[in-house]
Image (cartoon, grey):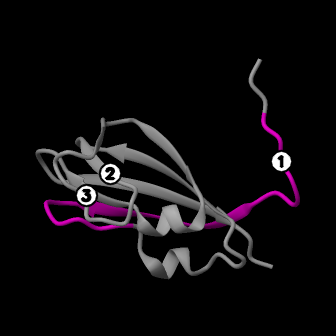
Amino acid sequence: MPYEVQIGRPLKFVAKGSITVGDAARGIPASDLDKVIGGETEVLLTIETDQIRIAFGGAAATTTDHRYNVDDSIRVAGSATCRAMTFIRVTNDATVRYTIFGRQD
């Protein structure tokens, strides 16, 4: 049976939004990620309307990075990873919805 261990205080809702992913790599807006204080960050992503590719290493996403399908949900943890990930479309522009959790105190 899977379980989660939580150390310290739980993360709180910080921000949510959506971005349109096209043929130019882009990430979650820094203005939303900057609302997290203290570095502990998690982002929940939901892919809508078309497939996308995600790069997690700080380089711009390309056609060889991880592919995600419509209705996939992805949980990404770590401030540096959340800030460095970038998205590009596979075929058509796609919408990615995001919810950011972190510390605000």
Per the rendering, the mark at residue 80 is none
Residue holding disc 3: 61
Amino acid carrying label 3: it is Ala
Front residue (pair 46, 43): 43
Q: CA distance from mark 1 to mark 2?
A: 27 Å
Asked if disc 2 and disc 3 are in contact, CB closer than 8 Å, the reply is yes
For the record, the magenta segment spans 4-27
Asked if disc 1 and disc 3 are in contact, CB closer than 8 Å, the reply is no
Instruction: Tell how many labels.
Output: 3
Q: Secondary structure at mark 2?
A: strand
Residue holding disc 1: 6
Q: Is residue 9 magenta?
A: yes
Q: Secondary structure at mark 1?
A: loop
Disc on the earlier residue, 2 or 3: 2
Residue holding disc 2: 54
Disc on the earlier residue, 1 or 2: 1
| Crowd rating for badge 1 (residues with CA inside 10 Å; few <14, some 14–19, many 20+) | few
Q: CA distance from mark 1 to mark 3?
A: 31 Å
